[in-house]
Amino acid sequence: MIVARRLNPVGCQYLIGADDQRLRGSIASLCPIRPRVLEIHLVWSFVYFAFGRIVELTLLCFRSRESKGVEILVLRHELDIFRRQQPLPRLEPKD
């Protein structure tokens, strides 16, 4: 009986000897995502995230002064609502 041993308890790497060629296909199918595909996905995910932030920053620079003022007004209103929801702590004589 030929048994494949794991090199790492987490992941998809297995130790396969030269006489275990017939197992190579079945063991490789146990790993759902190959490491190379995962790296490519991670890079494209970062590129998408960075591009979105650059576009947001560019649009922010070209916004009018009035729209920035309206946004500040809305943020101040949200802060007032949050302050009303959270009661102030009671101060004791020690404080």
Image: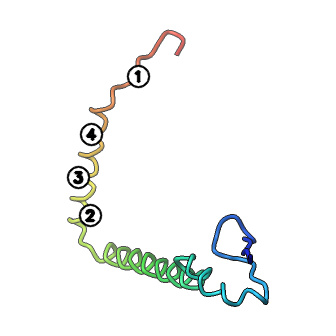
Location of residue 39 (image quadrant): bottom right
Q: Earlier in the sequence, mark 2 or mark 1?
A: 2
How far apart are labels 2 and 1 at the CA level? 33 Å
Foreground tag (4 vs 2): 4
Q: Residue furthest top?
A: 93
Find out whether the residues at labels 3 and 2 contact each other: C-beta distance under 8 Å.
Answer: no
Residue 9 drawn above or below residue 84: below
Q: Which residue is mark 4?
A: 80
Query: Is label 3 or label 2 in front?
Result: 3
Crowdedness near tag 3: few (<14), some (14–19) or many (≥20) residues, C-alpha within 10 Å: few
Residue pictured at 28% horizontal, 51% vertical: 75
Which residue does the numbered mark 1 point to in the structure image? Answer: 89
Q: Is residue 60 above or below residue 26?
A: above
Quadrant in which the N terminus is drawn? bottom right
Q: Extreme front residue here?
A: 1
Q: Quadrant of residue 55?
A: bottom left
State the CA–CA distance, disc 1 to disc 4: 17 Å
Which residue is the site of mark 3? Answer: 74
Q: Amino acid at mark 2?
A: Lys
Could you tell me how far apart the alpha carbons at marks 3 and 2 are, in whole angstroms? 10 Å
Query: Between residues 89 and 46, which one lies in front from this camera angle?
Result: 46
Residue type at numbered disc 3:
Val
Q: CA distance from mark 4 to mark 3?
A: 10 Å
**Which residue in the structure is indicated by mark 2?**
68
Above or below residue 74? Residue 10 is below
CB-based contact (under 8 Å), mark 4 and mark 3: no
